[in-house]
Image (cartoon, grey):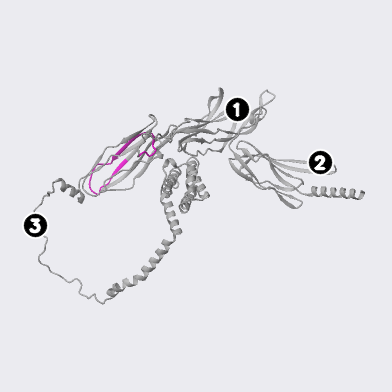
């Protein structure tokens, strides 16, 4: 029995010593899912002391505390317990799923690594109340508010979102940083410049506050139903009062960082009524005037004139198409030049858009240009209105006669045409000739004769080679698709390329090119160009997810780049990325 007892004791001692000899190095986090306004604690723990501790690169987080080092060393029942910890406090820079990479340390000449940890960062969440916590004090005295002008608009009706930061007089703000911007899915959006805004005095929930207008955004909903307006989130460096006082009786301040968010807002977008909707309605919503005007009505044949079709007023001017002009076939018409003179304010888009047609008549006569209609939805009366231009008659004073016009004139004169007699009308016929030889040398059997005779036979092999190459090229379905895709990309992006270096003009042209390409490729209208809808349609066309993501990211870059400093290198990269993405979509779409 004593032998067995001693054997058990020996086994226990061996197992204990082996367990204590095993090195552990691991990473532990306070939570794996947190809001963008919360903090994350990560501890790197080891049971043996080591050297050369290397933390991971916290690229998606801001280190707001640490590294803090703690060591615990104890003996329990003769067994030594050791723990050393490096602690960091992190603040997420934005939403998404992020991976905290491996940390490394050297223990007894061996390198040990932690396991990577995936962290999910969501939108802002509510923080538990604690009156003694600086974060709670800040949350009670700092508020970010999104004021929405209308929560029940019509489709394509302008609404505004104004973001205001309210701060209690007892709080001091050092600076702030925008960490999460709303994406405005399902909206056409444009930010309004707020630089130079001054701090104002006001009230918030009946109490005195100071406030600053941070951002003003105009939105045009592109879908009906309930739409979500995502929150804006800021990381603010604050100084908040404590319950301690200095020797003069003044409250002591403590520094803290606070993430505040304008909460999610939901609006309900009404669809435009079907009753009374004109067949030619193209999505115009607002208050407009319509004009069709020629640069002149009398001109000579082969002389050009400009016909301008213009819409002016207040509404979604950039989000609908102007009506097309229908002209007689005897008038040569060129593609219109589109022009936009639109300003965006808190009341929405204001200004004018126009299509200018260049017209060149070829024959003498009078040419009527039929009246043109433009319809829109009037928000004031909540009904459809139609504006119609007057008929315009072009008078071509001189030039050759069109056969069709001559025949019409003959019918109008009961088939009788005046015959003009002239005694010299046959004077041009010569009754005698004097032929003179122009070449006295014989052409037959000369070098030129044999060359011209044999040339068709020599051209036959060349024609066969060209035909075979053409057949090979026609059979190359994939290659033809690539060439067609590249041609389309160059066609739609040509205007954007000309504007490289002019930031605002370039990104407006790039966005328009992407929209025009999608409308041509997917057969959709402007009001259907929401990011979710584009994502769905391209996925149905079997376009790869990465290509769709790149296309959406380019659209988002166009929206954001107008309001941030951009150099020409970035513009060139965005242009090349857009060309490549359009080409890939055209290759992959089924």
- Extent of the magenta region: 280-308
Real-space Cα separation, disc 3 to disc 1, in angstroms: 106 Å
Query: Along the polypeptide, which appears first: circle 1 or circle 2?
Result: 2
**Taking 481 as reference, is 456 above or below it?**
below
Query: Along the polypeptide, which appears first: circle 3 or circle 1?
Result: 1
* Residue placed under numbered mark 3 in the picture: 424
Q: Are marks 1 and 2 in contact (CB under 8 Å)?
A: no
User: Which is more toward the observer, 507 or 413?
Assistant: 413
Whether residue 192 appears in this view of the structure is no
Real-space Cα separation, disc 3 to disc 2, in angstroms: 133 Å
**Taking 388 as reference, is 512 above or below it?**
below
User: Which is more toward the observer, 573 or 460?
Assistant: 460
Position in image of residue 528 (x %, y %) = 44, 41
Query: Along the polypeptide, which appears first: circle 3 or circle 2?
Result: 2
Q: Element under label 1?
A: helix
Mark 2 packing: few (<14 Cα in 10 Å), some, or many (20+)? few
* Residue placed under numbered mark 1 in the picture: 141
* Residue placed under numbered mark 2 in the picture: 74
Q: Is residue 415 left or right of residue 165?
A: left
Mark 1 packing: few (<14 Cα in 10 Å), some, or many (20+)? some
- The residue drawn where x is 82% and y is 44% is 80
Position in image of residue 510 (x %, y %) = 44, 46
- The residue drawn where x is 64% and y is 32% is 255
Q: Could you say which disc has been placed on residue 483 in the image?
A: none
User: Which is more toward the observer, 269 or 254?
Assistant: 269
Position in image of residue 544 (x %, y %) = 51, 51
Q: Element under label 3?
A: loop
> Could you say which quadrant of the image residue 526 lies in?
top left
Q: Disc 1 or disc 2, which is closer to the eye?
A: 2
Q: Element under label 2?
A: strand
Real-space Cα separation, disc 1 to disc 2, in angstroms: 45 Å
């Amino acid at each position: 029995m004593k032998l067995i007892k001693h054997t058990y004791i020996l086994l226990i001692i061996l197992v204990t010593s082996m367990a204590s000899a095993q090195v552990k190095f691991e990473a532990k986090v306070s939570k794996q899912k947190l809001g963008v306004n919360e903090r994350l604690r990560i501890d790197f723990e080891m049971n043996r002391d080591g050297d050369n501790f290397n933390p991971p690169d916290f690229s998606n987080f801001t280190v707001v505390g640490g590294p803090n080092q703690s060591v615990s060393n104890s003996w329990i029942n003769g067994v030594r317990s050791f723990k050393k910890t490096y602690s960091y406090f992190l603040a997420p820079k934005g939403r998404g799923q992020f991976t905290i990479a491996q940390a490394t340390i050297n223990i007894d000449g061996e390198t040990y690594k932690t396991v990577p940890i995936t962290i999910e960062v969501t939108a802002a969440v509510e923080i538990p109340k604690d009156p003694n916590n600086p974060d709670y004090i800040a949350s009670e005295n700092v508020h970010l508010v999104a004021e929405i002008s209308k929560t029940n608009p019509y489709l394509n009706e302008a609404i505004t979102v104004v973001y205001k930061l309210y701060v209690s007089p007892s709080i001091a703000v050092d600076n702030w940083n925008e960490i999460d911007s709303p994406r405005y899915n399902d909206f056409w959006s444009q930010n309004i410049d707020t630089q130079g805004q001054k701090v104002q005095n006001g009230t918030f929930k009946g109490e005195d506050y100071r406030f600053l207008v941070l951002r003003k955004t105009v939105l045009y909903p592109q879908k009906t139903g309930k739409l979500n307006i995502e929150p804006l989130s800021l990381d603010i460096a604050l100084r908040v009062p404590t319950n301690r006082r200095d020797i003069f009786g003044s409250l002591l301040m403590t520094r803290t960082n606070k993430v505040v968010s304008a909460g999610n807002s939901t609006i309900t977008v009404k669809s435009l009524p079907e009753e009374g909707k004109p067949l030619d309605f193209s999505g115009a919503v607002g208050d407009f005037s319509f004009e069709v005007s020629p640069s002149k009505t009398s001109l000579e044949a082969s002389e050009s004139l400009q016909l301008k079709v213009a819409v002016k007023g207040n509404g979604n001017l950039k989000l609908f198409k102007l009506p097309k002009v229908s002209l007689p076939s005897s008038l040569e018409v060129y593609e219109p030049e589109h022009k936009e003179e639109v300003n965006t304010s808190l009341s929405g888009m204001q200004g004018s858009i126009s299509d200018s047609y260049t017209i060149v008549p070829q024959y003498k006569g009078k040419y009527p240009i039929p009246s043109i209609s433009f319809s829109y939805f009037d928000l004031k009366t909540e009904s459809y209105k139609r504006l119609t231009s007057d008929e315009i008659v072009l008078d071509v004073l001189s030039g050759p006669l069109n056969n069709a016009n001559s025949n019409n004139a003959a019918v109008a004169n009961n088939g009788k045409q005046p015959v003009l007699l002239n005694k010299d009308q046959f004077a041009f016929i010569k009754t005698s000739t004097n032929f003179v030889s122009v070449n006295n040398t014989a052409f037959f059997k000369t070098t030129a004769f044999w060359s011209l005779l044999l040339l068709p036979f020599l051209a036959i092999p060349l024609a066969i080679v060209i035909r075979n190459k053409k057949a090979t090229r026609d059979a190359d379905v994939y290659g033809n698709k690539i060439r067609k895709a590249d041609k389309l990309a160059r066609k739609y992006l040509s205007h954007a390329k000309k504007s490289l270096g002019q930031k605002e003009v370039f990104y407006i042209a790039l966005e328009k090119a992407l929209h025009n390409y999608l409308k041509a490729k997917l057969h959709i209208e402007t009001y259907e160009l929401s990011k979710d809808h584009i994502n769905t349609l391209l996925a149905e066309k079997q376009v790869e997810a990465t290509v769709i993501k790149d296309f959406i990211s380019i659209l988002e870059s166009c929206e954001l780049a107008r309001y941030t400093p951009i150099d020409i290198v970035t513009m060139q990269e965005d242009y090349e990325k857009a060309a490549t993405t359009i080409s890939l979509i055209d290759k992959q779409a089924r």
